[in-house]
Amino acid sequence: MTPRRGRYTEYRGRPKGKSKSYYTDLDSIALIAWKHDSDPERLADAFFDAFQHKIAHYGDLTIYCREVHHDTGTFLVEKDGKTIWQAPIHLESIRNPSVRAYLRTIPIPDYVAKKNYPKNQKIGDLRFGMKGINVIAKIIEIPPAIGVNTRWGSSATVSNVKIADETGSTQLSLWNDQIGVVHVGDVIELKNCYVARYAGALQVRLGRKGTLSIMNQHSQEELNQI
């Protein structure tokens, strides 16, 4: 059954309390990564390696840290010996995990979404804007359901269930009858999901044709270390 969405206020923009320039730097890193079929977080790792060792490689990209002045480094990115990007980067944006977490919330451009990411996803690889994906995970927490008013004026109940696999954890938004179908410890298979953002965190939701299935015992044993 397709869940109905209530009047949630989606988190928009960058996290509060940090310099906007940090997130502008990460926007640039993400754009470079997507243009060259790379992963933004791994490219950010390469920038940090270049800061530590003056040079780093990721795929067919070479990253140089030309100089460091106070809390800013000047970086240059080359591909096949040609410069494709050069600019200063605030070091906090590549070495602070809480700031770098913003990379996972940058919307994936449509041209990337259509060609690059696999249909079957691990939680640790989820990115805001992914659509039509499948996820297998274990339910580790089911908060009490709360009542909301839907956009159509009717009432509904929702629970933001916590799910996890060996790569991480996230929320799964379940509605109405879906909430009573699952229990803590269940291993579930989600098909045709999309990744949204709520209150600053990523959240998995079922699409219009999405399904939730309880996996068999064999699958549960495969995930018993979660």
Image (cartoon, rainbow, N blue to C red):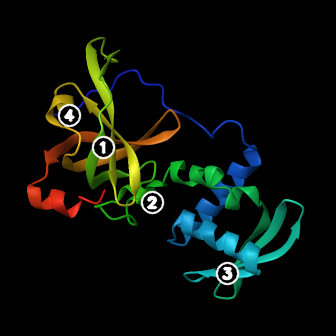
Q: Closer to the camera: disc 1 or disc 3? A: 1
Q: Residue furthest right?
A: 69
Q: Is residue 156 above or below residue 88?
A: above
Alpha carbon distance from label 4 to label 1: 22 Å
Q: CA distance from mark 1 to mark 3?
A: 38 Å
Q: Write the residue at 17% across / 29% down.
A: 180
Q: Residue at horizontal 54%, vertical 50%? A: 106
Identify the image quadrant of residue 143.
top left
**Where residue 188 appears, x then y in whole percent?**
20, 49
Task: Give left or right: position of 115 versus 139.
Answer: right
Residue to which mark 4 is pinned = 2
Residue 55 is left or right of residue 145, and the answer is right
Q: Which of pointers 3 and 4 lies earlier in the amino acid sequence?
A: 4
* Residue situated furthest front in the rendering: 225
Which kind of residue does numbered mark 1 sit on?
A: Ile
Give the residue pinned by disc 2: 111
In this view, the mark in front (4 or 1): 1
* Amino acid of disc 4: Thr
User: Does the residue at mark 4 contact the one at mark 2 (Cβ under 8 Å)?
Assistant: no
Q: Nearer the viewer, residue 108 or 156?
A: 156
Q: CA distance from mark 2 to mark 1?
A: 34 Å
Task: Give the numbered dot on residue 56.
Answer: 3
Q: Secondary structure at mark 3?
A: strand
> Which mark's residue is nearer the viewer, 4 or 2?
4
**Whether residue 102 is situated above or below residue 184 in the rendered picture:** below
Q: Nearer the viewer, mark 2 or mark 3?
A: 3
Q: Residue, x 79% and y 66% (percent of image)?
A: 87
Q: Distance from label 2 to label 3 (Cα)?
A: 27 Å
- Compare marks 4 and 2 and give the one earlier in the sequence: 4
| Disc 1: which residue | 140
Around disc 3, counting alpha carbons within 10 Å, would you say few (fewer than 14), some (14 to 19), or many (20 or more)?
many
Q: Secondary structure at mark 1?
A: strand
